[in-house]
Image (tube, rainbow, N blue to C red):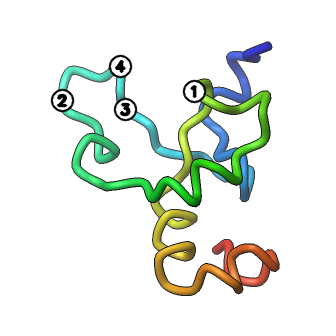
Amino acid sequence: MSDIQNDYLCPFCQSNNQCGVDAIDACWCREKSVPQGLLNLLPLASKQKHCICASCIDAYNKNINLFKAGLSID
């Protein structure tokens, strides 16, 4: 179930994901590669419904283990 208020929240850190997929200009997410391992960590209810923020993608890429431990989400 998608809640419009939560559509703009990253499913990991709950910050604004800055998604602009519906904007006139191309969204940053069209240029940034999201690792499959990170997508696999998404809660089932968020899969293909909520965008991951750039900060979480960067944190995952920087140190997967810290990201998984929840220590480097910001």
Vertical comparison of 59 with 42: above or below? below
Q: Which mark is residue 25?
A: 2
- 4 or 1: mark nearer the eye: 1
Q: Where's residue 21, x and y in %?
A: 35, 27
The quarter of the image holding the C terminus is bottom right
Alpha carbon of mark 2 to alpha carbon of mark 3: how far? Answer: 8 Å
Q: Earlier in the sequence, mark 4 or mark 1?
A: 4
Disc 1: which residue: 48
Label 3 sits on a secondary structure element that is: loop
Q: Residue at x 72, y 55 (%)?
A: 12
Label 1 sits on a secondary structure element that is: loop
Q: Residue at x 70, y 46 (%)?
A: 42
Q: Earlier in the sequence, mark 3 or mark 1?
A: 3
Q: Are marks 2 and 4 in contact (CB under 8 Å)?
A: no
Q: Residue at x 61, y 32 (%)?
A: 50
Q: In the image, what residue type sits under mark 1? A: Gln
Q: Earlier in the sequence, mark 2 or mark 1?
A: 2
Q: In the image, what residue type sits under mark 2? A: Asp
Label 4 sits on a secondary structure element that is: loop
Label 2 sits on a secondary structure element that is: loop
Alpha carbon of mark 4 to alpha carbon of mark 3: how far? Answer: 5 Å
Q: In the image, what residue type sits under mark 4? A: Asp
- 3 or 1: mark nearer the eye: 1
Q: Earlier in the sequence, mark 2 or mark 3?
A: 3
Q: In the image shown, does 19 or 61 lie closer to the viewer? A: 61
Alpha carbon of mark 2 to alpha carbon of mark 4: how far? Answer: 8 Å
Q: Are marks 2 and 3 in contact (CB under 8 Å)?
A: yes
Disc 3: which residue: 20
Disc 4: which residue: 22
Badge 2 crowding class, 10 Å Cα cut-off, few under 14, some 14 to 19, many 20 or more, is few
